[in-house]
Amino acid sequence: MKKIITLLITLAMVLTMAVPTFATDDVAGDTDVVKPAQLTAAQVKALKPSGVKAASYSYTKIKLTWDKIEGVDGYKVYRAISKGGKYSLVKTTTSANTLSYINTGRTTGKTYYYKIRGYKKIGKTTYYTKYSAVRSTYARPNKAVITKVTCPKENCVRLYWNKVDGATGYQIYKRKKGTTTWKNTDYKNDKFSWKYSTKYNYATHMLTTFAASGDSAYSKWEYKVRAYRTVNGKKIYGYFSEPKEYVPDWTIGEIYEELWKYGESLAWTEYEYINADGSPDENGEYIRPRKDGKKYRFKHYKGSYTFDGGENWYGVFTNPEHGPTTAPAGSTYEPDTPENSSWDVLWPERISYYNTKELILKELKPMIKNELYSLHYSNPLYWDPYWDFESAGYSGVDSFSLYIEKDRNSYKIWSLW
């Protein structure tokens, strides 16, 4: 019996000791729970909302934002049509975490005034914070976005932008890159022509080239757009888009490479001089295509280098298949230019910044082909294998040269021989 009583007492002690242990664990868990701030009535009344901002959200909407007040139940938003006028409650939120409100149905261009205050219910009574500072704004069309700038033809820029809801029309501004003055396109002394399409939301800027300076077509331009909505005969403007300019789809290095490769790709028939009886003769009075149909190609020539005071002359080519592409150390190199070349300048051509790679090559490739054809047909040094053949073959003249020079925001290109 004594043993049974001792066992019961021991068991009771174990059970009694277990209860405080579990209670302690629960308390520890409660300390991890974040409880809302317990504001008193006096504390609520002393608070004042901060960070209040009012901004247009569309042509019929205004958005209010503010900073959070810890411990309140929500916020009340008030609106008036004058700063000192009567304010009406337009929105009550039910959470301290709701920090914005969009006021819809506003009249475009009409200024509205807003203020907010927080509230908290303690017991059966609702207490309010102080009013915030008054903020005002008006609804306007949204900010336009220029989606792309293209070049439909030489010296022509076309702007595309997004459609802005509620817009009656759009206004386009332009300025020369690097300047500070923007010009509206309807400026009465504007000498640039525009074509505008409301259907596709684009405008085309034709860059006119002035004979005196050539400045318009060869200066960089940037553009910005804004929408407007007409209300009672007055234009209410939206925000300007970010400035944007035309960026070519080419570099001058790419154009240069395309042109010389094209020139070298053209095959030309070799001719020979013949006598009346048809026998080959370098002094023959007739020419004809070679009977074996042999053809040749021009090599693109960049310049020359010399050793020993100029006694030995060597060509520098673009394509390593035809000779050295760089002058070796110790030599004197002279690039082929219109100024120092003994060759004739066939044509100077200006490559405008406002052009596409496709249009540039479409214009210049036929010019190169025509010039090489003229050289090929008129000068036997290019194709007659019997002309000074034993000593120099083609005498090193079966070549052409292209020279490109930077010219403000354009380039000049020459074909030389």
Image: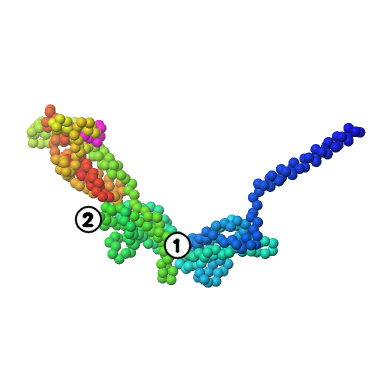
Q: Is residue 46 left or right of residue 142?
A: right
Q: Who is closer to the viewer here, 389 or 131?
A: 131
Q: Tell how many labels.
A: 2
**Disc marking residue 213:** 2
The first of marks 2 and 1 along the sequence is 1
Picture residue at 82% right of the left edge, 38% below the top: 13
Which amino acid, mark 2?
Ser
At x 71% / y 43%, what residue is drawn?
Answer: 25
**In the rendered image, which quarter contains the N terminus?**
top right
Callout 1: SS: loop
Q: Which mark is residue 141?
A: 1
Q: Which residues are magenta?
A: 314-321
Expressed as whole percent of the image width and height from the top left, the position of residue 337 reads 19, 42
- Crowding around mark 1 (Cα neighbors within 10 Å: few <14, some 14 to 19, many 20+) is many
Is 112 on the left-hand or right-hand side of 346? right
Element marked by disc 2? loop
Q: Residue at x 56, y 69 (%)?
A: 88
Q: Is residue 281 above or below residue 374?
A: above
The three-letter amino acid code for the residue at tag 1 is Pro
